[in-house]
Image: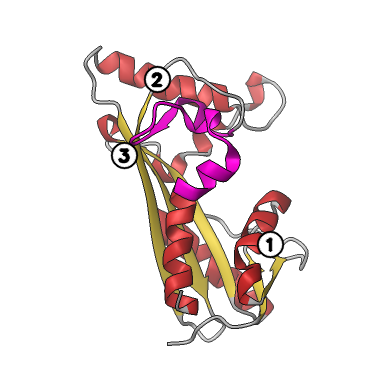
């Protein structure tokens, strides 16, 4: 199997924050990360119905367009009582419609939507949930590897904390009392779904 080595790796993102985070994680292994955005690569339509499918769509598109190995991630929240929703549509649930004002994402609206659906089921509703992260690596020749990470927990209401983003203020990781938005970033990164997936990637690709 082809493996990552020292050299350039395209990160299939146009998000500078995500590029910085992934670059820091891979720097100890001699990997130089460059974003798909900096190369002017288009963002492919995420037409998959699973995290794995969407991560592979992004990684393969970046690898084929750049001629380099590429890494993509797809992540989201799944709520047991909602049959795994919002799942791959985690970000979509935060999208404001044109009649709601300026376009963009409203995470408080998204958290409220989840809470409203749980309350509609009943006061004793199961509130277990999990954050998922899939990392996909693709090479120009067609090979690929996939690593799945998970952080189990439960949902709380009302939102608490100001340190996180997305659904972090309502997610309490298993074994903790604080929400992700109340936990220091470095501590959150150590137990997160992304950390779990990266640990598996590093063990497989770099042997440690």
- Residue 94 or 180: which is nearer the viewer? 180
**123 left or right, relative to 166:** left
| Disc 1 to disc 2: CB gap under 8 Å | no
Instruction: Of the two numbered discs 3 and 1 on the same chain, state the one appearing first in sequence.
Output: 1
Position of residue 96 relative to residue 122, above or below, is below
How many marks are shown on the rendered structure?
3
In three-dimensional space, the C-alpha distance between marks 2 and 3, rounded to whole angstroms, equals 14 Å
- Residue 135 or 61: which is nearer the viewer? 135
**75 left or right, relative to 119:** right
Residue where numbered disc 1 is placed:
42
Comparing labels 3 and 1, the label whose residue is closer to the camera: 3
Residue range of the region highlighted in magenta in the rendering: 164-191
Instruction: Of the two numbered discs 2 and 3 on the same chain, state the one appearing first in sequence.
Output: 3
Label 3: how many residues lie within 10 Å, few (<14), some (14-19) or many (20+)?
A: few
Res 149 label: none
- Residue 184's x, y, as percent? 58, 36
Q: Secondary structure at mark 2?
A: helix
Residue lying at the far top of the rendered structure: 123
In three-dimensional space, the C-alpha distance between marks 1 and 2, rounded to whole angstroms, equals 35 Å
Q: Quadrant of residue 1?
A: bottom left
Check if residue 165 falls in the magenta segment: yes
Q: Secondary structure at mark 3?
A: loop
Instruction: Of the two numbered discs 1 and 2 on the same chain, state the one appearing first in sequence.
Output: 1
Q: Quadrant of residue 117?
A: top left
- Residue 55 or 145: which is nearer the viewer? 145
- Residue 133's x, y, as percent? 44, 53
- Residue 146's x, y, as percent? 41, 68
Res 115 label: 2
Position of residue 161 relative to residue 63, above or below, is above
Q: Residue at x 64, y 65 (%)?
A: 11
Residue where numbered disc 3 is placed:
84
Q: Secondary structure at mark 1?
A: loop
């Amino acid at each position: 199997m082809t493996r990552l080595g020292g050299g350039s790796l395209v990160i299939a993102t146009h998000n500078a924050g995500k590029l910085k985070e992934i670059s820091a994680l891979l720097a100890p292994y001699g990997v130089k990360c460059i974003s798909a955005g900096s190369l002017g690569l288009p963002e492919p339509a995420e037409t998959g119905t699973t995290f794995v499918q969407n991560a592979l769509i992004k990684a393969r598109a970046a690898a084929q367009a750049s001629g380099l190995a590429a890494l993509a991630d797809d992540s989201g929240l799944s709520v047991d009582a909602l049959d795994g929703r919002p799942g791959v549509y985690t970000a979509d649930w935060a999208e404001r419609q044109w009649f709601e004002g300026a376009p963009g994402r409203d995470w408080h609206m998204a958290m409220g939507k989840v809470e409203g659906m749980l309350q509609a089921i009943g006061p004793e509703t199961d509130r277990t949930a999990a954050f998922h992260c899939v990392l996909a690596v693709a090479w120009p020749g067609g090979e690929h590897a996939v690593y799945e990470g998970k952080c189990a927990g439960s949902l709380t209401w009302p939102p608490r904390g100001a340190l996180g983003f997305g659904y972090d203020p309502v997610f309490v990781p298993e074994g903790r009392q604080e929400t992700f938005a109340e936990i220091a970033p470095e501590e959150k990164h150590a137990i997160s779904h992304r950390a779990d997936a990266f640990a598996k990637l590093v063990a497989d690709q770099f042997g440690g």
